[in-house]
């Protein structure tokens, strides 16, 4: 009955415009938060490198080929990298200063051995559990991250030998040995593969193992820093790319392209996020203003209802429920449009070779829920203040 009395003669043009704006705002809000999260997660879990992390080295040119310039880094250069505002951290990549031979040690596959090159970085640069990435003298095995190119080479060898090829999961179950040595002595250590990478051409081992082997089996040759692991701050990849050009540095093209792609798309979605927040706020303010006008236009009806014995709280809740139900429908409509949009946008990303996580970001749904609760609370406060001021002041 109260709804018929209070809302039967309202001008809905402004109301409908505000609703349309709010629906678009909710759609943009959910989309921008969802894809901002999913784009930044792109590649995570598929690579052993952490997010926004790359390996850089100096470019090789004619002068370096003639040994007129150096391609290695000094400790001072690595330290200066850390002072750049867009670099979160930088660390020298430690290389083996001893001979290494990788051998298969499993009865289910043929004997295979190859000279390999080892490197190590701090675990904070890697997307791998610290519990898996540790070693001490006496452990049953040393964890190893293998380049996928090496697995391709191993499968090529097995195919040529008429032996079934192995998958990445199966490779993690195979037993290997590392023979570390110098001119005078050698040692065999069991090894297990714990991950794969496309970005690093060498085998990665824990820093503790590298220190042990370099101390006990060093060939006495000078150890040089030829690679530096750098992690950039979120959204600062453009500065990093210019930094590489200015300093004559380079990284793998795939790392640069992924970093550039994530930076550009993240920036676009941040702009969209700002626009959507402004749109939702403006639409919310228009709806609140409409609530105030609705109370004023129903001044006579409210007076009659109060004289008939209706409590002010009942009338306030009626207005609040009306606006709350309206915003609830707006939120649901925005979410429905988001799922339609998501299906289309995800297909565009897949056509471009970018496979994003298809699950809906819970944060985007949480933000819509918070927006709804905030709007209902503000509507209640505005209705309460307006009615008490108009009829009880």
Image: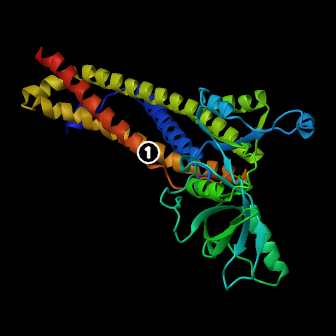
Q: Nearer the viewer, residue 158 or 349?
A: 158
Q: Position of residue 101 (x, y in %)?
A: 74, 67
Is residue 134 shown above or below 139?
A: above
Q: Label 1: which residue?
A: 363
Q: Residue at x 50, y 57 (%)?
A: 129
The residue lying at 81 percent from left, 73 percent from top is 156
Vertical placement of residue 362 versus 231, above or below = below
Mark 1, residues whose alpha carbon is within 10 Å: few (<14), some, or many (≥20)? few
Q: Position of residue 334 (x, y in %)?
A: 47, 42
Q: Quadrant of the C terminus?
A: top left
Which SS class for mark 1?
Answer: helix
Left or right of 187? Residue 288 is: left
Which sits in the foreground, 20 or 185?
Answer: 185
Q: In the figure, is residue 126 to the left or right of 381?
A: right
Q: Quadrant of the N terminus?
A: top left
Q: Evaluate whether residue 272 shows in this view.
A: yes
Q: Is residue 318 left or right of residue 166?
A: left
Q: Nearer the viewer, residue 137 or 115?
A: 137
Residue at image coords 15%, 34%: 314
Q: Quarter of the image holding residue 10?
A: top left
Pick the front one: 130 or 344: 130
Q: How is the image coloured?
A: rainbow
Which image quarter: residue 146? bottom right
Residue 169 in which image quadrant: bottom right
């Amino acid at each position: 009955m109260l709804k018929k009395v209070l809302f039967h003669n309202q001008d809905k043009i402004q109301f409908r415009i505000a609703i349309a704006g709010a629906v678009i705002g909710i759609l943009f809000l959910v989309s921008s938060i969802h894809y901002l999260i999913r784009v930044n997660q792109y590649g995570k879990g598929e690579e052993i490198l952490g997010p926004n992390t790359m390996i850089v080295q100096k470019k090789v040119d004619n002068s370096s080929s003639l040994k007129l310039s150096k391609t290695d880094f000094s400790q001072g250069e690595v330290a200066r990298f850390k002072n750049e505002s867009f670099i979160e951290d930088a660390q020298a990549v430690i290389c083996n200063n001893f001979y290494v031979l990788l051998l298969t040690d499993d009865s289910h596959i043929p004997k295979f051995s190859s000279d390999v090159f080892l490197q190590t970085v701090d675990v904070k640069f890697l997307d791998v559990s610290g519990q898996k990435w540790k070693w001490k003298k006496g452990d049953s095995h040393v964890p190893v991250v293998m380049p996928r190119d090496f697995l391709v080479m191993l499968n090529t060898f097995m195919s040529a030998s008429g032996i079934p090829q192995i998958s990445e999961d199966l490779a993690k179950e195979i037993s290997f040995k590392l023979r570390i040595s110098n001119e005078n002595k050698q040692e065999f250590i069991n090894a297990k593969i714990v991950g794969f990478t496309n970005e690093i051409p060498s085998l990665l081992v824990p820093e503790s193992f590298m220190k042990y082997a370099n101390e006990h089996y060093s060939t006495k040759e000078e150890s040089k820093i030829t690679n530096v692991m750098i992690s950039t701050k979120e959204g600062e990849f453009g500065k990093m790319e210019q930094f590489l050009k200015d300093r004559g540095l380079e990284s793998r093209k795939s790392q640069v392209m992924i970093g550039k792609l994530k930076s550009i798309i993240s920036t676009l979605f941040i702009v969209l996020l700002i626009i959507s927040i402004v749109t939702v706020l403006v639409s919310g303010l228009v709806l609140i203003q409409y609530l105030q006008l609705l109370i004023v236009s129903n001044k006579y009806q409210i007076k009659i209802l109060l004289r008939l014995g209706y409590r002010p709280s009942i009338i306030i809740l009626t207005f609040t429920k009306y606006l709350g139900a309206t915003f609830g429908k707006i939120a649901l409509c925005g979410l429905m449009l988001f799922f339609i949009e998501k299906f289309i946008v995800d297909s565009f990303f897949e056509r471009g070779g970018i496979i994003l996580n298809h699950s809906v970001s819970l944060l985007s749904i949480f933000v819509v829920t918070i927006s709804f609760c905030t709007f209902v609370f503000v509507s209640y406060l505005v209705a309460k203040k307006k009615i008490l001021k108009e009829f009880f002041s």
